[in-house]
Image (cartoon, helix red, strand yellow):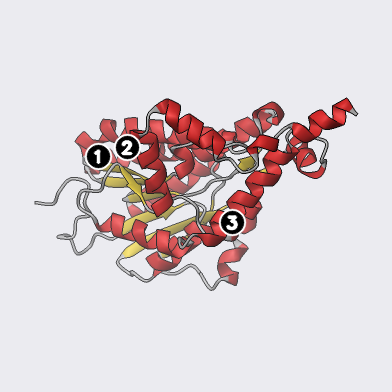
Amino acid sequence: MDEPGAPRKSDPRHVEVVLVTGASVGLGLALARLLLEDESRHLVLTARADSLPRFAELGIREGRRVWLRALDITSAAQRWSVVQEIETELGGVDTLINNAGITYRTVAEYATAAELSHQMVVNYEGPMALAALVLPSMRKRRRGRIIQISSAGGLVAMPTMGLYSASKFALEAASEAMHYEVRPFGIRVTLVQPGFINSPGYRSSVVGRLSRQATEQPGDPYHLHFEHMDRLVGRLMALTSATPESVARRVIKLMRRRRPPLRMLVTWDARLLWWFRRFMPQAAYVWLTYHTLPGVSNWGRRSAEKTRL
């Protein structure tokens, strides 16, 4: 008897249907390329409408077992349309990989309501709403997998990254609750938590108007926050051995596991952060984190000196 949640390999007619969001760049693209090597799956690769031409540029085209679909994760209508087409034509999603995401760079004082809302709808509300759409079919078939691409930012929060971490903390909490809710129906939920990945994705972070001014104006109270954190993250991303391809390979291995875990830490720095957060006393953790922030002794000093002048 097949284990609940595992593909029905005993049925030769069954083809695992995998839906991947944000599949035209970064980790999503690396996943798409690896999944294309396995013809036993039917892939539904999605991206925003303005990003769909990238697939052709990268040599990825529709075929008998490959669909390319426009999907803005923030659009309820597009979420419903994609899932409904899969339900009608393919019988439902077997594995959902919620990979689409965005990163806002800002500090709490400069974050606008619109920035906060967009960050949350892309990284938290959209993925959870998409998961809710595929669950009824999975529940009826008593099998299915939902893989949420989270981040070490869902474990710890760092300066200038608060909105991003808030969205990932929310995704972590909601996905853990969902894990317990749907496991009795044979559905498995896993949070994949990478740390820093050596890719150009960080450079596409969204910086709001006030935060951009802070990066450009040395007299801004938060100028050094951005300057030092940008340098730190840039160095860490350049030094890490993790790439979109290496993380994608771990996700593919996860898909083959009969008993996938609730959380999977896929890079050494994510594991280190998890260990520190879990086992270090809170006061020691906060002290160590603050005093290891790059140049923190100077943060705010430039604006104070300017005020005195």
**Residue drawn 61% across the image and 31% down it:** 117
User: Distance from label 2 to label 3 (Cα)?
Assistant: 44 Å
* Left or right: where 213 falls relative to 125: right
**Residue drawn 63% across the image and 41% down it:** 104
* Left or right: where 139 falls relative to 290: left
* Number of other residues with Cα within 10 Å of mark 3, as a class: few under 14, some 14 to 19, many 20 or more: few
User: Distance from label 3 to label 1 (Cα)?
Assistant: 48 Å
Up-down: is 96 above or below 12? above
Contact? badges 2 and 3 (CB < 8 Å): no
- The residue that label 2 is drawn on is 136
**Residue drawn 80% across the image and 39% down it:** 213
* Left or right: where 197 falls relative to 223: left
- The residue that label 1 is drawn on is 140
- Which of the two labelled residues, at mark 3 and mark 1, occupies the earlier sequence position? 1
In the rendered structure, which amino acid carries the disc numbered 3? Arg
SS at badge 1:
helix
How far across and how far down the image is residue 12, in percent? 19, 64
SS at badge 3:
helix
Residue 151 visible here: no
